[in-house]
Amino acid sequence: MFLGEYQHTIDTKGRLIIPARLREGLGDRFIMTKGLDSCLFAYPPDEWSNIERKMRSLPSTRADTRAFVRFFFAGASECEFDKQGRILIPSNLRDYAGLEKDVMVLGVSSRVEIWSVERWKQYCSESASSVEEIAEKIVDFDIGI
């Protein structure tokens, strides 16, 4: 399980240090892709396989399904750590998430998310007022918050 919020910077070559706690869970190689809310999602191989299997079972006759599968898989890239614990984030993914210098690296249960600091602050500001409302809506899922 991934937890925590870490602020880091991307160097001029597009490399980012992933915190050791999150690195351990991702493994030597992992998959990074376009996430929702204009951030990036990073998955360890076993979690990526689970997602891939579930998406493969979706009906390809539906246009919305095809669009989401294309969005999720076409931008995906296999990443690996260098000796300093850095990853090279492909330029297409940096552009999508608006990553330039300051970033937030988040542990979010089964995945790691990478956000530009600006977009993360904006997201937090916009969603802060609705968190309690959302919690009331998901109470039916019996997660015991």
Image (cartoon, rainbow, N blue to C red):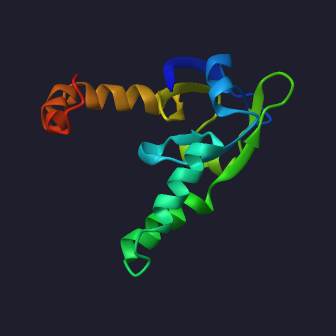
Against 118, is 52 above or below?
A: below
Assign the C terminus to one quadrant of the image: top left
Expressed as whole percent of the image width and height from the top left, the position of residue 37 reads 41, 44
Against 62, is 98 above or below?
A: above
Q: Is residue 60 found left or right of 111 in the rendered image?
A: left
Residue at 63% from the left image edge and 28% from the top image edge: 25
Expressed as whole percent of the image width and height from the top left, the position of residue 12 reads 78, 32
Q: Is residue 64 found left or right of 79 in the rendered image?
A: left
Decide which of 49, 80 is in the foreground and name it.
49
Residue 54 appears anywhere in the view: yes
Q: Is residue 18 found left or right of 43 in the rendered image?
A: right
Residue at 18% from the left image edge and 30% from the top image edge: 135
Residue at 49% from the left image edge and 35% from the top image edge: 110
Quarter where residue 101 is shown: top right
Residue at 58% from the left image edge and 49% from the top image edge: 48
Expressed as whole percent of the image width and height from the top left, the position of residue 117 reads 51, 26
Residue furthest out toward the right? 83
Q: Is residue 62 found left or right of 85 in the rendered image?
A: left
Quarter where residue 58 is shown: bottom left
